[in-house]
Each structure stands twice: as structure tokens, then as C-alpha cells.
Image: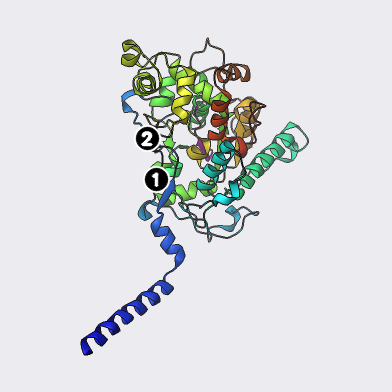
Amino acid sequence: MRLTCMFSFILLFGAAGLVVFIHLQDPEEIVHQQTPGIKYNMGFQQSKKDCVSSDNQDRIRKNTADGVTMVKQNDSLHLSENGPTKLQSTDRGQSSIMFAMKDQQKGEEINSIRLHKRRRRFIIKKSPILISMNSSILNLPTLKSEDRNNKWKSLYQIQRERKQIMRETCSKYKSNNRRIITPYHVSRIFVEDKYRVLYCEVPKAGCSNWKRVLMVLNGLASSTKDIQHNTVHYGNYLKRLDGFDHKGIYHRLNTYTKMLFIREPFEKLVSAFRDKFEHPNNYYHPVFGKAIISRYRVNATKEALRTGSGVKFKEFIQYLLDVHRPVGMDIHWDHVNRLCSPCLIDYDFVGKFESMEEDANFFLHLIGAPQNLTFPKFKDRHSNEERTTTKITQQYFAQLSPSQRQRSYDFYYMDYLMFNYSKPFEDLY
């Protein structure tokens, strides 16, 4: 009898201790420990790949339909709210934002929505859209008094509107409550220290010529025309932001002018396909082409399977939309939201490929670049071939079924929303 009482007492004491322990724990810390990373619907993003292939030096991200990018505490850059107040945006709250919290979606909210629309919104809710937390000392370089009555004034207003749309999109789909930036998030950002510029590279949106401009600004060349293609991409003359220590990253994010240039998503996708699969390429054909043909082409010839050449656009789209794709993602067709983290990094200037010359020269004017330096107009590769236009893009997408076009739009939906691009086809929803 005594032994039974003692055993019961021990059980009650243990249960009481467990209850006390749970009440003393911070629920936020428990969630953070359980979800230490960011959940993606596609594979890992490689951090050191340029906006053209590097052949054998390039690495492919592992393909995973539900991968997790781990954020290690000792590799994280915590940006404090106690930083210089002049660097903070005036229209932001002081609440902390944590990178890597996943937002759960309630199934009952989408029961009445059509299948593709429901899938798109589910992806958006599950993806960790991060709220911008650092604004440079300039936010946008102030217009000089002589500029306020000319064409620069309207361009300045366009920039404010683009940034506002981007912020509103980020705020609408936020899912974090702490601010964490790791070197991973800034691995695509190039640094120009002389004019204090940070440029996030978006392939097929003028990245080659922008690198030429940065090299001229840095005194590495006297003219953009003097810089060859291989020098731009393989010379390693430009520094990347992730090459600095945490202090260096923090300082530059908060004091340099941060800019990116984007392009209409479908047009950028077709441009990448034409460049990588319709011309000889000793990286994309054997690595991507062979895997795509092997998976999606019925009765493929031995020659096609051996070389990987001749990938059709429809096959390429099948690969892109396949959650179990046979080879990983690539920066040339990845989302801008993942390449540049515009909801985590507060970009001061957002340019568009469609208005490249006007936007680029306005940016150079704002940073005080030499007056004889203008953005180059020449086509970097396949110069005899027509640039990818809206008309050419529509011709390629006409090869797809309505369902494939819709799913492609869903795939890039956040880029369309964040950068205020119109639907490319009327039958999309």
C-alpha cells in the first residue's frame, strides 16, 4: 500500500513539474526552434552563380519540392532597431520581424475559389514574405533644386509609387516578426564603394551592362564599350556583399543606395530560354537539356538524349512547373522575390527593363555619376538576333495550353503583383 502511494505521488509531482515548465516557456521561442528555416516550393538557390553560365564552375541547386534553407544563428546578421534613426523609414512600425516563420493557411478560407487560384494563394500564404527593415540614409537621393521643374521630377514620383506598391505587397503577405538577414540573402548583390551603390543582379534584365557601368564607376575601365563579356562575368572584378563580414554588410545596407532592375516575368523567361536553349551552350544543354528531354519527350532520339540540344519551349515549361523537376532551379528563371529579397531589403531604386534607358540614366544622375557615363544600349550576346519583345513572348506562350499559361502566371504571381505588371493574357485570372 505504501509503495503504491509513493508511486502515485511521484507521478503527480512529475506531471505538475511538466505543467510549470510549459507555462514558463516562451511560445515564440518554441515555434522558432521548430521552424529554423524558410520553406520553398522549389530547390535551393545557389549563392555564387553569375547571370550567365560558368560551365564546369557552376553548381546546380538540389531539386526538392519542399526544401528548407536553414538559418544558423551564428551566420545571421541581426539588424537592431536601435541603429541610427536617420536610416530608418518613417512609414514603418518598430515591430520586429523574424525570417523563417511559416504562416499556416486555413482551408476554409479558399473552399469556394477555383483550383488554380486556390493553389496560387496557398503558395503565397505559405511562402515567407519578409518585411523590409533597412532603409539607406538617402532612401531616394534628394532632387536638386534645378531638377524639380524638369523631367527628373516625374521619374522621382514614379520611383516613389513603385516602392509604395512593393511595400504594400510585402505588408499584405508578411509572415514574420523578427528581423534577420544572412549573407545568403545578399549573395546576389554587387558592391561599388566609390559611389556607394549596391546592385542586385537580376539575369535577363540588363545585368551585363549594369556590371559594366559599376566597373566604370569603380575606375576599372574608362568606358563600358571597352569591357568584354567574359571580363564582366568571369573576371571577378566586382565585390559581392556576402564577401564582407557582418559589420560590413550592415554598414553598406544602411548607408549605400540599393537598387535593382526587373523585367516582365514572361518576357524575361522567354529571353532566358532563347539564350540558353536555342544557341550552343556547353553548360545548359548537357545539364538542363538532357534532363528535360529525358523526362518530358516521348520517343526522344539517342542524339537528343546524348547532347541535350533542341529543348522545346513546351518541354521547358513542363520542367519549370514540375514540383518534382529532374534538375534544380536556375537564377535565369527564378523569382525576383527570391533572388533579391525585396521584402527584406528596402531597395531605394526600382528600375524596369521596359524603361531601361530612362530609369538607368536617372539613377546615374541621382548618385552623381560622371555626366559622360550613360547606360550602354548594345546587346551583350547574340547581337544579330532581335531582342525578346512582347510580341515574341506571346508567340512562345501561344504554344502552350491555357492551363499551362495559367500555371506559369501562378508561378510568377508574386513578381507580377509586387512590381505592378499587368496580366500578359486576357484569359488569366
Q: CA distance from mark 1 to mark 2?
A: 13 Å
For the residue pair 258 and 317, the one nearer the viewer reads as 317
Q: Is residue 196 magenta?
A: yes
Point out residue 200 in the picture as x, y percentages from the top left corner.
Answer: 50, 36
Q: Amino acid at mark 1?
A: Thr
For the residue pair 295 and 285, the one nearer the viewer reads as 295
- How crowded is the residue under tag 2: few (<14 C-alpha within 10 Å), some, or many (20+)? some
Sequence-earlier tag: 1 or 2: 2
Q: Is residue 249 above or below residue 376?
A: below
The stretch of residues the image draws in magenta is 192-203
Q: Which residue is mark 1?
A: 69
Q: Amino acid at mark 2?
A: Asn
Residue at the far front in the pictured view: 1
Indicate the quadrant where residue 142 lies.
top right
In the image, what residue occupies the spot 59% across and 28% down?
264
- How crowded is the residue under tag 1: few (<14 C-alpha within 10 Å), some, or many (20+)? some
